[in-house]
Image (cartoon, grey):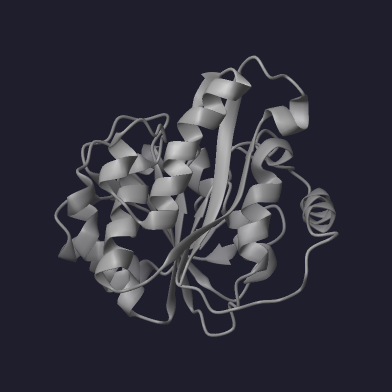
Amino acid sequence: MRKMSVAGQFYPLECSEIKRYIEVFSQELKPEKEEYRAIISPHAGYVYSGFTANLAYSKIDFSKIKRVLVIGPSHRVYLKGASIALYATYETPCADMKVDKRYSEYLKNRYEFLDFQQSAHAEHSTETQVPFIEFYAPHVNLVEVVYGELNYKDLLPLMEEVLKNEENFLVISTDLSHFYDLNQANTIDSICLKAVNEMNILDLDKGCEACGMIGVKAVLQASKNLDLKSKVIDYRTSADASNDKSRVVGYMSALIS
């Protein structure tokens, strides 16, 4: 089992509290769901970035999806390449989810940069996505990939293969700028938002700061290669929750169709 490692820190330990959070986040949202291929989602504590993440998840029609791949950067362990989780199940406060171990092993054998390093999977960038997935799509199987030192071009073939299969759904995890004042953060993050909307990989290198930059570049280029479109649907900072405008973190969510 892939055990929870940040429950009670980044998101509630109790299932009832997770459902309460999502209910509050969803209060004024229209219940309109469409078929999308991927999302970009933030991974901070739910009090800060949960609304932004939930907005993306709430719009997805998961009825035809059998497998969700969650890809995020490693914050705690140095990795050369990436680690793919070879567990049988994934623990969440509400219910344990099935890991698609066969598909994970297939990807590991197909792509040289993939390995399995158990310590890499005590990672919040991916784990914070899973309670949302369990809430909106409890029937799916999970694949978790945590990457470290890696060229985004190495991820491209994997992402293109994943996106071509309509039974797959892709979640790319990232936060934006960290610890600038609000005005600076808005300026820096606007570069990221524009680049994601325009699917312009080169513009991401003109000042955008994102801990999941590798994943963002790879999914945008893969989507562009497959004639998919990207749209940012929410942006905010930690100041929206804390009212502290002196040192903020930026969050966005985007839909890819």
- Image coordinates of residue 236 in percent, x first then y, are 64, 39
User: Which residue appears at 76% of the width and 25% of the height?
Assistant: 242
> Does 237 appear above or below 168?
above
Is residue 139 found left or right of 51 in the rendered image? left
Q: Quadrant of the C terminus?
A: bottom left
Q: Residue at x 67, y 30 (%)?
A: 238
| Mark count | 0
Q: From the viewer's perspective, is residue 82 above or below residue 164?
A: above
- Residue at screen point 72% across, 19% down: 244
- Can residue 5 be seen here? The reply is no
Say which of 164 and 109 sits in front. 164
Instruction: Give the x, y percent position of residue 157.
Output: 20, 64
* Residue 183 image offset from top left, x and y in percent: 59, 23
Picture coordinates of residue 73 (x, y %)? 39, 40
Asked whether, in this view, residue 240 is left or right of residue 255, the answer is right
- Depth order, front residue of 103/213: 213
Q: Does residue 59 appear in the picture of this structure?
A: yes
Direction left: furthest residue: 112
Res 246 quadrant in image: top right
Which residue occupies 40% across, 31% down? 209
In the displayed orientation, state which residue is furthest to the bottom: 64
Above or below, 149 relative to 135: above
Q: Nearer the viewer, residue 160 or 144?
A: 160
